[in-house]
């Protein structure tokens, strides 16, 4: 699993790399800055629902494949 945010865990970096995309390419497809993608991957920023849906569409996966809640 990718970097951890206290409220959301993500697998974005792995799935993005598996799709053969750079952060810049993904950011252009999702209409956000590359820094936003980097912040999500590093667990600093929790994306909006709209952004999560745009990212999942670009990567051809479900939002649940990208993000999950911590278990506890």
Image (cartoon, rainbow, N blue to C red):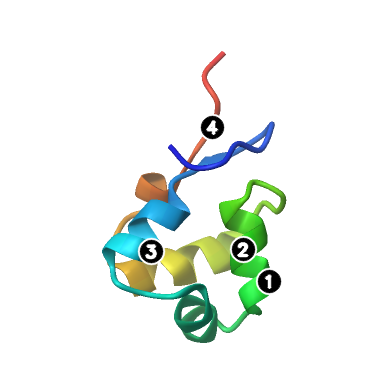
Q: Is residue 63 visible?
A: no
Q: Residue at x 28, y 61 (%)?
A: 18
Find the distance from the CA under tag 3 to the CA under tag 2: 11 Å
The answer to which quarter of the image holds residue 58 is bottom left
Q: Residue at x 45, y 54 (%)?
A: 12
> Mark 4 falls on what kind of element?
loop
Question: Looking at the image, is mark 3 or mark 4 nearer the viewer?
Answer: 3
State which tag comes first along the sequence, 3 or 1: 3
Find the distance from the CA under tag 2 to the CA under tag 1: 5 Å
Q: Residue at x 48, y 42 (%)?
A: 2
Find the distance from the CA under tag 3 to the CA under tag 1: 15 Å
Say if 72 sits above or below 31 in the image: above
Question: Looking at the image, is mark 1 or mark 4 nearer the viewer?
Answer: 1
> Mark 1 falls on what kind of element?
helix
Q: Which residue is mark 2?
A: 38
Callout 4 crowding tier (Cα within 10 Å): few <14, some 14–19, many ≥20:
few
Left or right of residue 6: residue 70: left
Q: Which residue is mark 1?
A: 35
Q: Is residue 57 visible?
A: yes
Find the distance from the CA under tag 3 to the CA under tag 4: 19 Å
């Amino acid at each position: 699993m990718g970097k951890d945010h206290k409220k959301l865990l993500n697998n974005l970096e792995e799935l993005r790399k598996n799709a053969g995309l750079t952060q810049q390419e993904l950011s252009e497809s999702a209409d956000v800055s590359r820094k936003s993608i980097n912040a999500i991957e590093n667990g600093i920023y929790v994306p909006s629902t709209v952004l999560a849906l745009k990212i999942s569409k670009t990567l051809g996966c479900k939002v649940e494949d990208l993000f999950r809640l911590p278990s506890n």
